[in-house]
Image (tube, rainbow, N blue to C red):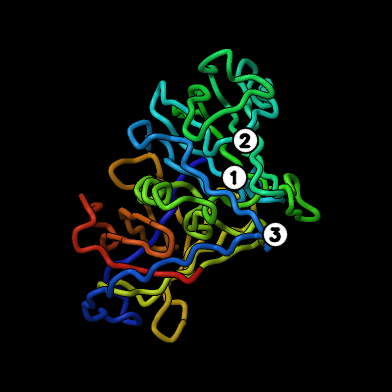
């Protein structure tokens, strides 16, 4: 599942859109952690299944819970995809008992490990797919594993040469009608304090192709299309707002609309991005008459965007970028 899609900022020279005064963005407000999906006592605390030194951002870094792509068009992504360096070790997110070791259903020669975790009378399961190797013969059904114990190494993933796993948390006391993986819940609310620190660092580097509309680590699995999200200027000289719209869950194309302070559309067109570009993804906004080239970075509710004037070259960095924010 891939990465990034971005946004605009920079002065519009159209007479309908006068230059905005430079504004300094206020400190980024914290994004509230989604509430736990259940009121049943017994909450599992989990670690990240990756060491910080094993992380990579060749393709996306982390692809979040709930986002919609061609392979999750109807039900939303039921876990996190986490990118690893080649040879990176996949670790158990919590102590438990191995429930199954299976051939990966999507990739021949790969493995899926499922671990059961019991907190009081509350049952959970963590799932690790696309393991290229298992670390030892002890990774077998009914074996007890410790939190952080190596399970195996991450396998190649997608078409860009990255290595990654799908990591999923199932709360077996919870059920969502009408969706595949009905027990799946976002890992975000269950992270321990040390795990959240690691996650925040990794998440700040992630870039995936659904961020313009589904930018959070935990997005709703239920989403109607066409789906739109509005980003409002919090600092810088760009237009007052920008709205991105995705026509369908299977569409890779997005449309955009630049907004005046009143909410009036002052420009519209199509969006092209390159999320694997580094250090920042590339964006191009194409209206019927002009193209604006830019760089962007999105972390949850905040986007930084450096957008050139029509016909001008793309900026080299995000110094002086406009800041946009969106509500959860």
Say if mark 2 contacts mark 1, CB within 8 Å: yes
Extreme-front residue of the structure: 120
Foreground disc of the pair 2, 1: 2
How many residues crowd mark 1 within 10 Å: few (<14), some (14–19), many (20+)? many
Q: What's the mark number on residue 79?
A: 1
Eyeballing the image, is 89 above or below 311? above
Residue 97 placed where, x, y %? Answer: 64, 31
Q: What's the mark number on residue 127?
A: 2
How many residues crowd mark 2 within 10 Å: few (<14), some (14–19), many (20+)? many
Residue 85 placed where, x, y %? Answer: 38, 28
- Nearer the N terminus, badge 1 or badge 3? 3
Residue at (23, 56) in percent of width and height: 318
Q: Name the image quarter holding the N terminus.
A: top right
Q: Quadrant of residue 279?
A: top left
Eyeballing the image, is 18 above or below 246? below
Extreme-right residue of the structure: 178
């Amino acid at each position: 599942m891939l990465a990034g899609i971005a946004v605009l900022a920079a002065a519009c020279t159209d007479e309908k859109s006068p230059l905005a005064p430079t504004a300094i963005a206020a400190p980024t407000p914290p994004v509230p952690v989604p509430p736990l999906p259940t009121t049943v006592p017994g909450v599992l605390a989990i670690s990240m299944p990756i060491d910080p030194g094993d992380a990579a951002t060749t393709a996306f870094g982390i692809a979040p819970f709930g986002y919609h792509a061609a392979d999750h068009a109807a039900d939303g992504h039921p876990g996190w995809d986490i990118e690893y360096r080649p040879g990176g070790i996949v670790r158990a997110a919590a102590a438990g008992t191995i429930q199954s070791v299976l051939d990966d259903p999507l990739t021949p020669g790969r493995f899926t490990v499922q671990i059961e975790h019991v907190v009081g009378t509350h049952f959970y399961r963590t799932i690790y797919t696309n393991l290229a190797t298992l670390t030892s013969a002890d990774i077998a059904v009914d074996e007890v594993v410790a939190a952080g114990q190596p399970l195996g190494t991450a396998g190649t993933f997608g078409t860009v040469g990255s290595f990654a796993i799908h990591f999923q948390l199932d709360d077996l006391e919870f059920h969502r009608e009408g969706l595949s993986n009905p027990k799946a819940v976002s890992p975000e609310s269950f992270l321990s304090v040390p795990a959240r620190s690691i996650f925040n660092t990794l998440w700040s580097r992630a870039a995936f192709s659904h961020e313009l509309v589904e930018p959070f680590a935990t997005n709703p699995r239920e989403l109607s299309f066409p789906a739109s999200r509005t980003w409002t200027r919090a600092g810088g000289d760009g237009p007052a707002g920008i709205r991105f719209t995705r026509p369908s869950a299977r569409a890779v194309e997005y449309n955009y609309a630049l907004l005046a302070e009143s909410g009036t559309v002052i420009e519209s067109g199509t969006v092209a991005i390159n999320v694997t570009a580094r250090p920042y993804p590339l964006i191009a906004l194409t209206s019927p008459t002009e193209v604006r080239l830019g760089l962007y970075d999105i972390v949850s509710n905040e986007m930084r965007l450096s957008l050139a004037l029509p016909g001008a070259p793309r900026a080299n960095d995000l110094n002086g970028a406009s800041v946009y924010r969106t509500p959860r």
